[in-house]
Amino acid sequence: MKTSGQLVVLGSINADHILNLDHFPTPGETVKGSHYQVAFGGKGANQAVAAGRSGAKIAFIACVGNDDTGRQVCQQLSKDNIDITPVSTVAGESTGVALIFVNNDGENVIGIHGGANMALTEALVAQHQGLIAGAEALLMQLESPLACVLAAANIARQHHTRVILNPAPACALSDELLGLVDIITPNETEAEILTGVPVTDDDSAAQAAEVLHNKGIATVIITLGSKGVWLSEQGRGTRVPGFRVNAVDTIAAGDTFNGAMVTALLEGRPLTEAIRFAHAAAAIAVTRKGAQPSVPWRHEIDDFLQQQG
């Protein structure tokens, strides 16, 4: 039996070590940083936090190491309105780590070590079958082992749970997995890797969306940075513009968008309205530093939208 509005997120948890620089170093170059912070991140956790803070009823399937970082992350996730019961502690593994450089334009380059995230197994996913089966939606990314993503998608499909996939970090995916996805949310780079179509404008976005529709995905949402998103439903496409703000750090913008959008969809909002809600959340996030520290709460998103008129 479905739990009304229940969202399950399956994904990664990382501790982000963030260093702000004037410019990214070239090979062999040392660049002095201007600001350093440690913040909690990981695409799965970021999207779970975005959903929790924007009002979703959410449970999170993930793994942390048996270390101080893992314990601190779980404490914080609980404060963000997330059910952490399905988060497993893995003995002998460290919690995942991301090393992030941010330049003066707010752009970032990231290296990650999976750590405990790689201990998310198909057997562990199977243990949470009831949770996935009872949810209305399952939101996933690609920082977890692909076999687990596929296993969870199969459970969701069998139990009519809507599957939303944010295919990041970019990699090639099997037609088997893509055929289980109801809504996919790639950026331009990820869309090109999945379809072979370079996305540079609305026309090429529509072409890429068509390739994904042909693989069985009903709804394609290609995020285009400051240009908004290309939304295509069963081949009917339109661009939904975002909001103009002064970005200082784009680290969790896409994650914030995904978590907020699914929250709005589970509240029964039309897709274009859900995207506008998600645009607002992401717009607030890019004006703040860090991943999870930048994610807005529901009242902030509602206030922002009210000011836009």
Image (cartoon, rainbow, N blue to C red):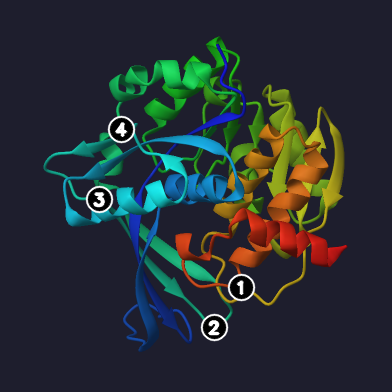
Between the residue at mark 1 and the residue at mark 2, the CA separation in whole angstroms equals 13 Å
Q: Earlier in the sequence, mark 2 or mark 4?
A: 2
Between the residue at mark 1 and the residue at mark 4, the CA separation in whole angstroms equals 33 Å
On residue 75, the disc is: none
Q: Earlier in the sequence, mark 1 or mark 2?
A: 2
Residue bearing mark 1? 287
Q: In this rendered view, identify the residue nearer to me: 94 or 304.
A: 304
Among the 4 quarters of the image, the one containing residue 88: top left
Q: Which of marks 1 and 4 is nearer the N terminus?
A: 4
Image quarter of the C terminus: bottom right
Q: Residues within 10 Å of mark 4 (few under 14, many from 20)?
A: many
| Residue beneath the point at 83% across and 65% down | 308
Residue bearing mark 4? 120
Disc 4 on helix, strand or loop?
Answer: loop
Between the residue at mark 3 and the residue at mark 2, the CA separation in whole angstroms equals 31 Å
On residue 70, the disc is: 3
Disc 1 on helix, strand or loop?
Answer: loop
| Residue beneath the point at 58% across and 57% down | 297
Give the amino acid at mark 2.
Asn
In this view, 133 is above or below 144: above
Residue bearing mark 2? 104
Q: Which of marks 3 and 1 is nearer the N terminus?
A: 3
Give the amino acid at mark 4.
Leu
Q: Residue 169 at x, y = what percent? A: 48, 48
Q: Do the residues labelled 1 and 4 touch (CB within 8 Å)?
A: no
Left or right: 108 in relation to 145: right
Q: Which of marks 4 and 3 is nearer the N terminus?
A: 3
Q: Do the residues labelled 2 and 4 touch (CB within 8 Å)?
A: no
Q: Do the residues labelled 4 and 3 touch (CB within 8 Å)?
A: no
Q: Do the residues labelled 3 and 2 touch (CB within 8 Å)?
A: no
